[in-house]
Image (cartoon, grey):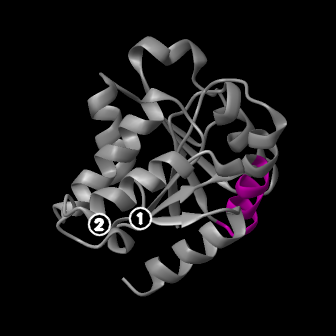
Amino acid sequence: MNICVFLSGADLDERYTRPAREFAELIGKGGHTLVWGGSDTGLMKVVADGVRESGGRLVGFSVSFLRDWARKDADEMVIAKDLAERKALLLAGSDAVVVLAGGLGTLDEATEVLELKKHKLHNKPVVLLNTAGFYDGLTLQLRRMEEEGFLPVPLAELVFVADEGAAALAHLEESVATR
């Protein structure tokens, strides 16, 4: 399975890097491919290292202005012209999406894939990996949107929230197998 992971390129605290590395190792040991933003920095590097070291493949999608930070030993690296093209390529090149801790770029990517899924423009499973409660606020907001009628489909059809990588991967494997 090609698993797209949206996450930060920043160097982060151990409470985020350790669970990200554990999830990456599950991807690699499971024989899956990491599809990611291609950077060799921060949390992106932690996950790419974990997948590579545990036997998985790396398929990166970077952008021209970040080319200097692209991982040199990726199995495949595509340089998109801009962030919009990169997001489209990441989604097209994956079977599932997992959102790890990240900043505005990660939030933008997450909300776009949820919006596309809401409109049935893809049917790939999407998981928020809620490491250290990072997405508690977003999850609360999404539930409020559902309760107050802002979502035309049940929240459970849009996204699965997992507190641990093993639960995230189990959900993806089950969802992709039954699609």
Q: Quadrant of residue 170?
A: bottom right
Q: Residues within 10 Å of mark 2 (few under 14, many from 20)?
A: few
- Amino acid type of the residue that numbered disc 2 sits on in the rendered structure: Glu
Closer to us: 75 or 137? 137
- Quick check: 21 left or right of 113? right
What's the magenta bit mostly, secondary-structure-wise?
helix
Name the one closer to the observer, 35 or 77: 35
Q: Which residue, given by chain and number where applicable, does mark 1 sit on?
A: 159
Q: Which amino acid, by three-letter code, is at mark 1? A: Val
Residue 109 position, x and y percent, is: 38, 40
Residue indicated by mark 2 = 147
Which residue shows up at 56% across the image and 12% down it? 68
Residue 129 shows which numbered tag?
none
Alpha-carbon span between mark 2 and mark 1: 15 Å
Of labels 2 and 1, earlier in sequence is 2
Q: Nearer the viewer, residue 72 or 11?
A: 11
